[in-house]
Amino acid sequence: MSQEQGIAKVDLSYIFKAVMMGSSLYSDNWEEGVMYLTNMNLWFSEGQNWLTLPLGNITMVGRDVSDSIRMKAQRSVGTTHVLIIDYLQSSSVVEGATAPAIALLAGNEAVVHTLKSYLQPMCGTPPKKQSLSDIDKKLLYMLSTGINDMQKLAFFVGADSETLTASFKNLREQNLCDTSGAVTDEGRRQLQEVM
Amino acid sequence: MSEMPPNLPPFMQNSAGAPPPMDGGGGGFAQSMGAFGALLKIQQNISERFPLSKVPWNETRKFLKALTIDAIKASSLYQFHIKFFNEMGLGSMQLISYAPMHYIFAVPNNPVCNCYPALNNQKVCVATTDALYRFFKENLELDCSVEEIECIKNGDEVCKFKVDLQPISAYQVMLDEHDKMILSGLRPPVDDTELMDRVKSLTIYKLLDNGKLSEIGGAYMQFANTMKVEEKTFDPPWKKAEELASIAASHNTFGSAFGEMTKKVQGEPSTDSVAKPASVSEENSKLQEEAKSSDSFAELMAKMKKS
């Protein structure tokens, strides 16, 4: 892999450095342009220049896209098909250090899925097998019916205890349930919305 | 937004000013696009056909209640699934191992592996993993996790995929009103043989234990009584194909069969109206030819759509 070799060229909309707070997107500066995929980098056109994202700096490809990001993409670039790429960039504060960043790619459904299918094995990032947000919803349903036995919850939700603990932590942090597993008023309101 | 496209990226510019071959191996951009394009074609098939192939719960129920590999393979849903994935370019998938809510599918000579010529010693079949996840989750309404456990690209004989259903979701689809009556301690209006079969299924699925409601069964009923979900009834996506096959079998001449088939399909948009895609290998050479004269995937895709 000493020489850079092109693999694909696609037309996409993207945000090279998106700013996210929780699961919401606070950037809206979508660029419409060309992206090259090579065996070493992603090349993004920006005006008359090029930005590169080394594949080696990518830490995750294809994490869950929240509904709010999809809606925002729909309004800005007319599609809900978004791929999130997490990567490390040089820190602008500490020399030699890295800081996490994310890029968002939006476009035709087939192109976005193909890029995901290509990048995940190339970057060595394992595909996400199950959506945590789905587990969160299921867990919240179960808790709302009064079932709070962890063994039963793990069986029903079909998740290992680590995943279930992470999901439970998520729900607590969002104030959807308390530490005993009792669903809060906010949790009940959200359940009604998703149902 | 950029108004003017920039010059070629630096990796495409050599000292003489002309771009070097995209793959550096003499095949040019077209060859590189062939592998990517083949995967793109598969993803296009998935995008177009998945939304048209939702399966009603009564068919998924038969699949879930089939308790041996042979019984599963005999189900209409399984046969549709295998044919459907093959038509999309995902290879000849088959069920090789089964336990309730856990399935292992194998794909010998997986065409998806051919889409990654430069990658070796790793699992690569993200497209198949995603397609299985979407099929179970979106078309069957079964929440699940899917994992590729063996891959030809990783030195294994075949690619293998493990599908684990989320029990709460499987129960929601699998249990009909008669099953719920049994779990509530009531006898449904069925004969003894059917009753025994239902009790057997519910026991295998851990909802009954020695003929009584298990702890899991009790917890599920507590959940189910709070969360009412309405079952939608509609024709399975393979129904029309079966009707057409039956018409063909019942007519002596092609002309009479064709006439009746035309009546059947006229004016009815359906999943069968989507043209069957050519196999990926056939598409590959065509794609490479088209890619030679295309500047980008947008242009290539436009051509592919027209054809």
Image (tube, rainbow, N blue to C red):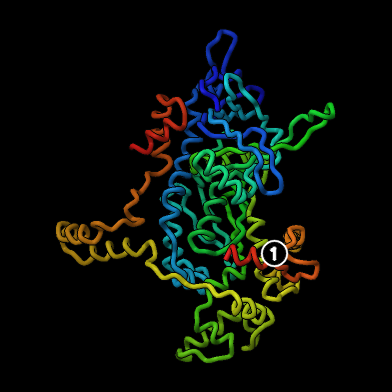
Q: Amino acid at mark 1?
A: Glu
Give left or right: position of B91 versus B264. right
On screen, residue B3 above or below B148: above
Give left or right: position of B269 versus B230. left
Q: Measured from the top left, where is residue A186 in percent x and y?
A: 69, 64
On screen, residue A101 above or below B276: above
Please state which of residues B45 and B154 is positioned toward the viewer in this rendering.
B45
Q: Measured from the top left, where is residue A104 in percent x and y?
A: 61, 38
On screen, residue B36 above or below B12: below
Please state which of residues B229 and B294 is positioned toward the viewer in this rendering.
B229
**Chain for numbered disc 1:** A
Label 1 neighbour load within 10 Å: few <14, some 14-19, many 20+: few
Q: Measured from the top left, where is residue B279 in percent x and y?
A: 40, 44
Question: Which residue is painted at 44% across and 41% down in the image?
Answer: B41
Q: Measured from the top left, where is residue A152 in percent x and y?
A: 71, 73
Please state which of residues B207 and A164 is positioned toward the viewer in this rendering.
A164
Question: Which residue is painted at 71% across and 37% down in the image?
Answer: A101
Is residue B263 among the parts visible in the rendering?
Answer: yes
Which of the image's four quarters has the N terminus of chain B? top right
Considering the numbered disc 1 on the image, is that residue within a helix, a strand or a loop? helix
Question: Which residue is painted at 42% across and 62% down in the image?
Answer: B79
On screen, residue B289 above or below A113: above
Occupied quadrant, residue A38:
top right
Is residue A113 among the parts visible in the rendering?
Answer: no
On the image, numbered disc 1 is attached to which residue? A186
